[in-house]
Amino acid sequence: MNRIGFIASSILVVLALLSSMLFVVDQRQFGVVYALGQIKEVITEPGLHFKLPPPFQNVSYIDKRLLTLDSSDTESMLTAEKQRVVIDWYVRWRISDPSEFIRNVGLDENAGALQLNRVVRNAFQAEINRRTVGELISSKRDDLMNDVKRQVIQVVKGGRPWGMEIVDVRITRVDYVEAITESVYRRMEAERKRVANELRSTGAAEGEKIRADADRQREVTLANAYRDAQKTKGDGDAEAARIYAEAFGKDPQFAKFYRSLDAYKASFGKKGDFMVVDPSSSDFFSAFRGSAASTAPAAVPRRP
């Protein structure tokens, strides 16, 4: 039993020793092998690798992917106009040389992000102090980001390289500080109201002009129509008078009788109409007085 226990213990010790000598490097990481606290080797290829067991050698891992650093500082910055603004920005960066990064920056990505945040903020502060608010929100914004990127690259690749690569620097927001944002909004609102009132007054004036022109055209149209109607009516009355004169001229006695009938019809158009006159002395009823004679049957000549 003691022999079997010794063999089992030996196997466990060997397995533990082998496990401490083997390590796996992921494709997303660098493997850094330390020998007594000094960097012995940097492994960039993924796979299974060997090292001496602790405490002779140890291994740590650093991310080799493209990293993003977002701004977390809300402190305002002064522009060239002495206006306080707050900006949001981000930086895309990666570790390119783990040895230089560990020696000059820190042991992990958080240390690099902390140092990079300070450098980027100082670069933005220097560039914003040289520019106006209008330039920050105009096409010159790209020039600002390029200048900041150039300054950051000069720092990380200076006398003591940081072992990192700066891929991009971008501004995501530029805004006034909260103390003056409200006054800016009120000024913008007043300006918009002024423009709106000006547009409304211009529209009202145009509307009055259009209505006046429409009324004028209406009056002109009605006047022309009335003129044409009166002319047509006059022509019709003249033609009717001519026809009446031509027709009645052939028999004046009948024309007088027909006119009298029209006068009677117009005078007694309703049941309640009445007239007090002396029929024997008034010429108005002369047609009635002469009707008996005019309507008496004529003598019919005898045929031989």
Image (cartoon, rainbow, N blue to C red):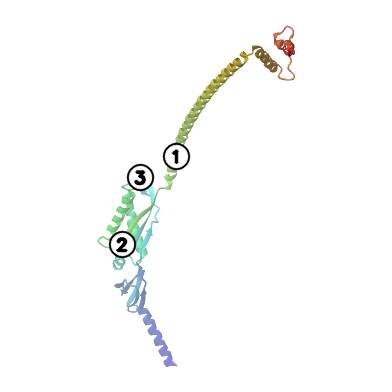
At numbered mark 2, what does the secondary structure look like: helix, strand or loop? strand
At numbered mark 3, what does the secondary structure look like: helix, strand or loop? helix
Do we see residue 78 in this rendering? Answer: no
- Image position of 221 (left or right of 39): right
Query: Image height check: is 110 above or below 6?
Result: above
Of marks 1 and 3, the one in the foreground: 1
Task: Give the distance between the C-alpha atoms of the residues marked 1 and 3, in whole angstroms.
Answer: 19 Å
Q: In percent of the image, x 31 and y 62: which residue is there?
A: 165
What is the three-letter code of the residue carrying label 3? Gly
The quarter holding residue 54 reads bottom left
Q: In percent of the image, x 35 and y 45: which residue is there?
A: 134
What residue would you read off at disc 2?
165
What residue would you read off at disc 1?
192
Query: Image height check: is 87 above or below 282?
Result: below
Disc assigned to residue 134:
3
100 and 205: which is toward the camera: 205
Give residue 46's position: percent from left, percent from top: 34, 73
- Image position of 173 (left or right of 277): left
